Image: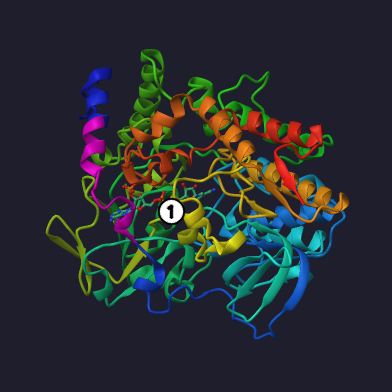
């Protein structure tokens, strides 16, 4: 469909369907490969040398696995509860999680920093910009860790190899690749959702003789520059970037400025709205009253859950989507379809306005409902395609056909390159063992994988029968949120409170009852709504298991709480308020 054509709703719906079908593939999630599989140096940390240390053999109250935002907040909330006997383990060399690993040029938060960066009031910090750069968020992680004295608790460059519940002493035993053996009363898994990079399984990719890396392991030795300086070594280099998701949208403008030639290899276009970033207004910052951050965070979450607010405090691209269509995550009736289609027509019209070459503009247009893929916001991504050194190679939904010793191949045409940047995302839809890299063995040595062979069973998506004193900050059967940091803040308040209460009450072990888990699953079913079906009809991606429509009970049991995020949060608050640890069996 070209710019001049008027599109009827039926034509557009048919186009969405056709574009989806083009992208469905039998291998689904199995199309992706892992790091060590492809790169000789595996998952090496390119940023920091590993310092030798003696193994830590000790007893602790809580072991927190993961030192990203979830791990940091878990630790801070324990400190706020007056607890100090805990450990935080992470394979990275510092606090930060995704903000430790991702240091690519152009990295920034796509959620407003005033609501994304935690503990701004406690640390007295105000981000310098509305959408802070990655380096500022990473530094803030360290600011929080220093403020709450978390460094002495941390074991970095430490990969957990096994976790096992010891029935005889009611402790979790955690082993690591550094020879550590911790025995912990409680264990929190804060492994994150963007912790394990994935690579497309492209024919011939192992034969490439140039330089290649994933965006989350940026090779500044090769590109030159830094997160804030130009990539000077690329001036005589031909670079291919594979992928056009939220990461690529941020990276492409920086590569476009630096490379002699940039090829952007696209399978599915992202929808890209205006960013309109700006420095923080000092007058606004000094006018903020205590409690402002919580109010702003909740106001945003209310908006993007489709709930009414008196005033939209954040007022950005995200809230604009939901002010136009409160049900953007569950488009159903004719009227909602029309609003959603119009919103995407506006996204497509913006491409025509900015991108000069009509063929390139046409290829950059996304054809799916707005929330099928994460909406992106950037002011320099689309203009990059007007540069003479930038070429979009659209694969018409098929993906890159092949890679040779010195080229990427699409439609039989070889594009010679010196460097390939994989902006190919993370195993966010994979099983917990794939993402974490280890199995969790609970009571009687039963693994979580076996226990959940017929689907997960939890209370609130956090506690699981057979896995005593275990807390998971993942979304299986839990809440979901556009601003994931908000959800993590509430989950960690909840887990820290529960740990503290268990200790105070002199209880050894907590574990949900079968009845409580079933009641929780029924709550999830009661909140299914239109969202559940919405993703299954979307174009393939990590949101819907690459287009698989799960019908088996095991997959259905993994549904999250589809009601408004703040309703989920209120359920947790009410449960704590009620105070009886309802639904938990205690020893
Ligand atoms: P995504 O999974 O969103 O994007 C991966 C890209 O690789 C897609 O465009 C995908 O195409 C493409 N791809 C996969 N296989 C092939 C292939 N064989 N040939 C060509 N292209 C291929 O990963 P991102 O890293 O971009 O983003 C992941 C998430 O990280 C975001 O959704 C967001 O949650 C988070 N993020 C957050 C930011 C923030 O500011 N808070 C910034 C950046 C990322 P296709 O769409 O067809 O699968």
Residue at 62% in and 67% down = 90
The residue segment tinted magenta is 17-32
- Magenta segment includes 292: no
Q: Is residue 168 above or below residue 107?
A: below
Query: Which residue is disc 1 drawn over?
Result: 430
Within 10 Å of disc 1 (Cα), the crowding (few <14, some 14-19, many 20+) is: some
Q: What SS does tag 1 mark?
A: loop
Q: Position of residue 513 (x, y in %)?
A: 65, 42
Q: Residue furthest left?
A: 412
Front-most of residues 512 and 316: 512
Q: Position of residue 306 (x, y in %)?
A: 55, 24
Front-most of residues 72 and 99: 72
- Magenta segment includes 30: yes
* Left or right of 26 on screen, residue 467: right
* Left or right of 325 on screen, residue 397: left
Q: Is residue 227 visible?
A: no
Residue at 53% in and 25% down = 526
Snapshot quadrant of residue 411: bottom left
Q: Give the dominant element type of the magenta stretch: helix, strand or loop.
A: helix
Q: Is residue 200 visible?
A: yes
Residue at 30% in and 41% down = 364
Q: Is residue 105 above or below residue 284?
A: below
* Left or right of 294 on screen, residue 91: left
């Amino acid at each position: 469909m070209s710019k001049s054509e008027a599109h009827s709703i039926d034509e557009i719906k048919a186009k969405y369907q056709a574009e989806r079908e083009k992208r469905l593939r039998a291998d689904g999630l199995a199309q992706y490969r892992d790091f060590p599989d492809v790169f000789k140096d595996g998952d090496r940390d390119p940023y920091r040398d590993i310092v030798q240390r003696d193994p830590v053999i000790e007893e602790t109250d809580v072991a927190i696995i993961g030192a990203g935002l979830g791990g940091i907040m878990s630790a801070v909330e324990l400190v706020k509860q007056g607890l100090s006997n805990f450990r935080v383990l992470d394979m990275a060399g510092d606090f930060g999680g995704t903000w430790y690993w991702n240091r690519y040029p152009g990295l920034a938060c796509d959620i407003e920093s005033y609501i994304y960066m935690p503990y701004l009031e406690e640390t007295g910090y105000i981000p310098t910009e509305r959408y802070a750069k990655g380096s500022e968020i990473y530094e803030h992680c360290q600011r929080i860790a220093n403020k709450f004295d978390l460094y002495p608790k941390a074991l970095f460059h430490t990969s957990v190899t096994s976790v096992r519940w010891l029935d005889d002493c009611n402790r979790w035993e955690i082993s690591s690749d550094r020879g550590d053996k911790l025995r912990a009363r409680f264990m929190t898994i804060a492994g994150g959702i963007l912790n394990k990079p994935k690579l497309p399984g492209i024919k011939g990719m192992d034969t490439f003789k140039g330089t290649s890396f994933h965006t989350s392991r940026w090779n500044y030795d090769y590109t030159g520059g830094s997160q804030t300086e130009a990539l000077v070594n690329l001036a005589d280099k031909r670079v291919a970037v594979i992928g056009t998701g939220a990461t690529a949208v941020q990276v492409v403008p920086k590569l476009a400025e630096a490379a002699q030639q940039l090829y952007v290899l696209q399978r599915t276009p992202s929808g890209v709205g205006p960013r309109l970033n700006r420095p923080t207004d000092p007058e606004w910052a000094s006018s903020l009253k205590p409690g402002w951050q919580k109010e702003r965070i909740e106001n945003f979450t209310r908006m993007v859950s489709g709930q009414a607010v008196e005033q939209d405090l954040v007022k950005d691209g995200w809230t604009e989507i939901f002010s136009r269509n409160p049900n953007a995550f569950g488009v159903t009736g004719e009227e909602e379809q029309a609003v959603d289609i119009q919103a995407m027509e506006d996204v497509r019209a913006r491409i025509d306005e900015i991108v000069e070459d009509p063929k390139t503009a046409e290829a950059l247009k996304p054809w799916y409902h707005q929330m099928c893929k994460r909406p992106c916001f950037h002011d320099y991504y689309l203009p990059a395609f007007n540069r003479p050194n930038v070429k979009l190679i659209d694969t018409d939904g098929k993906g890159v056909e092949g890679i040779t010793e010195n080229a990427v191949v699409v439609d039989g045409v070889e594009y010679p390159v010196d460097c390939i940047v994989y902006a190919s995302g993370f195993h966010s839809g994979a099983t917990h063992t794939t993402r974490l890299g280890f199995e969790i063995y609970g009571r009687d040595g039963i693994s979580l994988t076996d226990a959940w062979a017929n689907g997960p069973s939890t209370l609130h998506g956090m506690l699981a029968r057979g896995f005593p004193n275990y807390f998971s900050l993942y979304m299986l059967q839990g809440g979901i949120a556009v601003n994931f940091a908000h959800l993590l803040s509430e989950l960690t308040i909840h887990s820290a409170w529960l740990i503290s209460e268990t200790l105070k009450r002199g209880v050894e072990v907590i574990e949900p009852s079968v009845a409580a888990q079933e009641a929780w699953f029924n709550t999830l079913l009661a909140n299914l709504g239109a969202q559940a079906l919405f993703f299954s009809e979307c174009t393939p991606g990590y949101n819907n298991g690459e287009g698989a429509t799960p019908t088996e009970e095991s997959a259905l049991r993994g549904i999250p709480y589809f009601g408004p995020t703040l309703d989920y949060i209120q359920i947790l608050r009410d449960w704590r308020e009620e105070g009886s640890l309802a639904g938990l069996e205690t020893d």
